[in-house]
Amino acid sequence: MDLIILRTKKEEASKLLVIQKKAFKDDLEKYQDHESSPVNEPIERLRMKIELFFHYTIWLNDEIIGGIDVRDLGDGKYRLNRIFISPDFQGLGLGTRIMQVMESEFSQAKEWSLDTPHLNSKNHHFYEKLGYIKVGEHVITEKLRLVDYVKTIYNG
């Protein structure tokens, strides 16, 4: 399988938004977080993120299968704001490879942070396997809490 991760081009926004909606549909149904759900993100907001932040498109065999939104917090700290893969390609072991590529893309990083829904034990296991440590939680809605994770990178 030919996995490639490249900076997102504006013209890829529509395709990415379709995949993002599919990827987060189950979470929206479970948590009813209509205000904050990636499912309800307008195309204009996604285009703005592509312009302002480090936004990447995930390609597999010449097909767009997902996206990644990374934020530079300064001082060697980066935030994985969002990562998503089409449900059609989940469970194939691509996540670990994608995370390794992203971390190597930002080899200067001293720390990574991210959050994920409190009931998503699959994500918790995945991030913990990659060295992320749970550091807290924050409430989004009555039904949704996000678990905060941090990974410290030791260079040297």
Image: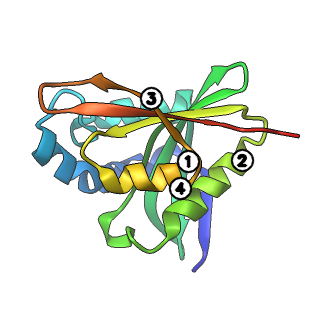
N-term mark: 3 or 2: 3
User: 10 Å neighbourhood of mark 1: few (<14), some, or many (≥20)?
Assistant: many
User: 10 Å neighbourhood of mark 2: few (<14), some, or many (≥20)?
Assistant: few
Please state which amino acid type lies under the numbered disc 4: Lys
Counting from the top left corner in percent of width and height, residue 91 is at 39, 71
On the rendered image, what quadrant is the C terminus found in? top right
Q: Disc 3 marks which residue?
A: 48
Of badges 3 and 2, nearer the viewer stands 2
Q: CA distance from mark 1 to mark 4?
A: 23 Å
Question: Residue placed at 77% from the left, 42% from the top?
Answer: 107
Q: CA distance from mark 2 to mark 4?
A: 20 Å
Counting from the top left corner in percent of width and height, residue 58 is at 52, 59
* Left or right relative to 57: residue 6: right
N-term mark: 4 or 3: 3
Element type where label 2 sits in the image: helix
Mark 1 vs 2: CB contact within 8 A: yes
Residue 10 in the image: above or below residue 138: below
Question: Residue placed at 42% from the left, 54% from the top?
Answer: 125
Of badges 1 and 4, nearer the viewer stands 4
Of badges 3 and 1, nearer the viewer stands 1
Q: CA distance from mark 3 to mark 1?
A: 13 Å
N-term mark: 3 or 1: 3
Of badges 1 and 2, nearer the viewer stands 2
Residue placed most toward the observer, 125 or 8: 125
Of badges 4 and 3, nearer the viewer stands 4
